[in-house]
Amino acid sequence: MSLDIIENKVAASGLITIDPASFAPEFPVVEFDIKPWLFRELILQEKSFREYVKSFDWSVFEGKVVAFTCSADAIIPVWAYMLLGVSVQPFAKRFFFGTKAHVEELLFAEAISKVDFDSYKDVRVILKGCGEIPVPENVYLMLSAGLLPVAKSLMYGEACSNVPVFKRK
């Protein structure tokens, strides 16, 4: 009687999978829209704005990354965002200007900038396509830009069902 040996072809293929979600921000990003603090949600009045800033409980941002933004089509002076930063600084891990999505993308980019892409020289790489954490499309492009000069091939998806993107000739 012969026994058929089951071979794990994926494990034997030498593919390296990179999960882009592993570069996600370490701390939650919270968006803070200053629109309600504007007069008629359009005009920043210094005195009332400073009162809002002074009376706000900034401790709600303890351990978080804060994305300050204004969804109104208003002209906001730079000092206003600086004042917000000074106020949130004792509590927040970090703070930025921009939407939550913009700040998350900045943090992804920051993490990707620390990758030693030379360690993927002549390697077959798959960028994982599905996961629990939403990954901005630009993250795939940033990773691709780092991998293209060094990787033997680049694919998208899972080892069992991938989409070839690039192969060095």
Image: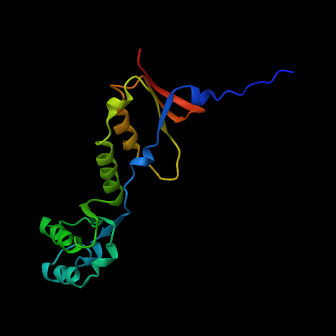
Viewer-proximal residue, 26 or 80?
26
Q: Is residue 61 above or below residue 9?
A: below
Q: Is residue 135 above or below residue 55?
A: above
| Quadrant of image for the N terminus | top right
Q: Residue furthest front?
A: 1
Q: Residue at x 38, y 29 (%)?
A: 120
Viewer-proximal residue, 153 or 68?
153
**Residue 26 location in percent, x, y?**
37, 57
Lateral position of residue 112 relative to residue 156, left or right: left
Viewer-proximal residue, 120 or 168?
120
| Quadrant of image for the C terminus | top left
Q: Residue at x 44, y 48 (%)?
A: 21
Image quadrant assignment for residue 2: top right
Q: Is residue 149 above or below residue 87?
A: above
**Residue 55 location in percent, x, y?**
24, 85
**Residue 12 location in percent, x, y?**
58, 26
Q: Residue at x 43, y 48 (%)?
A: 22
Lateral position of residue 30 relative to residue 48, left or right: right
How many numbered marks, from 0 up?
A: 0
Image colouring: rainbow
Q: Is residue 14 above or below residue 131?
A: above
Q: Residue at x 25, y 77 (%)?
A: 37
**Residue 89 location in percent, x, y?**
22, 70
Q: Residue furthest top?
A: 169
